[in-house]
Amino acid sequence: MAVRGALYYNLQLYRGGRKLISVWPSHNRYALAGSWTYKKHRYRLTRGLYTWFVWPGIGPRAAARYGKLLGKGSFLVVSR
């Protein structure tokens, strides 16, 4: 759901308590690729339970000002 005044969103994805990606899309949607790089590490979707969180970004991204948690969810990858 889009948030009025949000210039971007912060999406974070975790597996096993480890952050796998943090992205700042300018729209209220994001399509995760099958593989990606985050903090110089290459990741790909593998079997396991993934949990995501998303917050709205208020003002310029450099200000790192976020609203309340918009949502969280999880998904299970059973084969890859």
Image: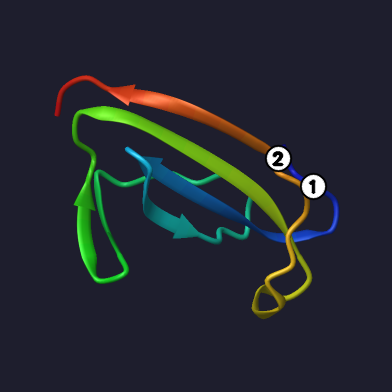
- The x, y position of residue 25, in whole percent, is 56, 58
| 41 or 5, nearer to the observer | 41
Residue at 33 percent of width and 23 percent of height: 76
Is the residue under label 1 in contact with that under label 2 (CB below 8 Å)?
yes
Which numbered disc, 2 or 1, marks the residue that appears first in the sequence? 1
Q: Is 75 displayed left or right of 55 in the figure?
A: left
Determine which of the numbered discs, if any, sits on residue 28 in the image. none
Few, some or many residues within 10 Å of mark 1 (<14, 14–19, 20+): some
Q: Is 75 displayed left or right of 60 in the figure?
A: left
Q: Is 56 displayed left or right of 29 in the figure?
A: right
Identify the element where label 1 is drawn.
loop
Residue at 39 percent of width and 52 percent of height: 19
The amino acid type, in three-letter code, at marker 1 is: Val
- The x, y position of residue 6, in whole percent, is 77, 58
Q: Of the residues tagged 2 and 1, which is closer to the observer?
A: 2
Query: Residue 73, relative to residue 59: is it above or below?
Result: above
Quick one: which residue is furthest to the top in this view?
A: 78
Query: Residue 13, relative to residue 63: is it above or below?
Result: above
Determine which of the numbered discs, if any, sits on residue 3 in the image. 1
The coloring applied to the image is rainbow
- The x, y position of residue 51, in whole percent, is 44, 34
Res 5 seen here: yes
Identify the element where label 2 is drawn.
loop
Residue at 74 percent of width and 43 percent of height: 2
- The x, y position of residue 65, in whole percent, is 74, 67
The amino acid type, in three-letter code, at marker 2 is: Leu
Which residue is identified by label 2?
A: 70
Q: Quadrant of the N terminus?
A: top right
